[in-house]
Amino acid sequence: MSGKRLLIDIGNGRTKFGLATAEEILDRREHATREISPDAVREIVRGWEFDGAMLCSVVPKAVPAFREVFGENLIELRHDTDMGIGIRYPKPESIGPDRLANAVALAHMHGAPGIVIDFGTAVTFDILSADKHYVGGVIAPGLRLMTDYLHERTALLPRVDLREPETAIGQSTEGAILAGAAIGYRGMVRGILEALKKELGSAAKTHIVATGGDAEWIISGIGEAIAVDPDLTLHGLRLVGNLRAPL
């Protein structure tokens, strides 16, 4: 027994791998999801020793490669998996497993009521009630999806490398796009958070955690106390794994 578990978070663009004990994530690797295959999986985890694997996926066609490699040693996070939190949602089977993993990490590591903001291809907001039930969320276009779409659907607007704009009033086409991306996107995030906190309406503090590729940059300009944890989804998988098959 190695006392370690492999954690796998299959996203639309990237698949994240974590090697973890029951208490912490020891190492991390990534791979393009579109290039996942059984041979690629074996190569990615080469040199890691672990007793089993815990997976969540928003790309169903990528999962068979992991089933082939790990077989019965693979646990797949689903809505009916024992997670240590409840679900109050009309169609729980429609909730993305990564969103459930985020909610688990929020509940066990930060507290409830709370909100997770996950900045990926889409930006998702997932809400945990004061009694630790997943109750719903918000889905909006991801930041890079928005800026790439501007480039792809217009004749003259360039694709830009995202960074902080020098001014709110753009002095070039690139500056105008950067201002729209940074200032506009943060405005959307603030507006959604304000509406969610109003509906939660709890006297207790609302715990807010952000994760995903653009989390650090976007949250830095929000002007609100929001924790950033790039490993939140992997931590959720670690915690569910501890419940399902203790190391």
Image (cartoon, rainbow, N blue to C red):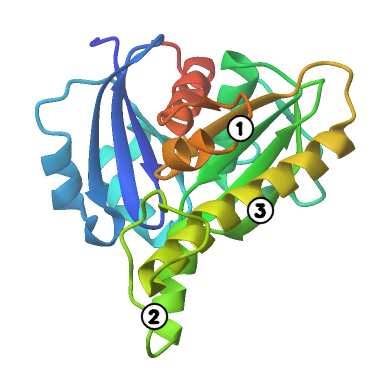
Q: Is residue 72 left or right of residue 49?
A: right
Camera-side residue of 185 and 152: 185
Q: Residue at x 28, y 52 (%)?
A: 65
**Circle 2 — which element?**
loop
Identity, as a three-letter code, of the amino acid under mark 2: Leu
Residue type beneath disc 3: Met
Q: Secondary structure at mark 1?
A: loop
Q: Residues within 10 Å of mark 1 (few under 14, many from 20)?
A: few
Pick the residue in front: 143 or 96: 143
Mark 1 and mark 3 lie on one chain; the one further toward the N terminus is: 3
Residue highlighted by disc 2: 157
- Cα–Cα gap, marks 3 and 2: 22 Å
Left or right: 50 in relation to 193: left
What whole-number distance in Å separates the C-alpha atoms at marks 1 and 3? 13 Å
- 81 sits left or right of 64 in the view: right
Total of numbered circles in the picture? 3
Q: Real-space Cα distance between discs 1 and 2?
A: 30 Å
Residue 28 seen in the figure = yes
The answer to whether 102 appears left or right of 170 in the picture is right
Is 81 above or below relative to 132?
below
Is residue 115 shown above or below 11? above
Front tag of 1 and 3: 1
Which disc, if any, is residue 188?
3
Label located before the other in sequence (1 or 2): 2
Residue type at mark 1? Gly
Nearest to N terminus: mark 3 or mark 2: 2
Q: Is residue 175 above or below residue 192?
A: below
- Considering depth in this image, is 38 or 195 the residue closer to the camera? 195
**Residue lying at 88% horizontally and 38% vertically, measured from the top left:** 199
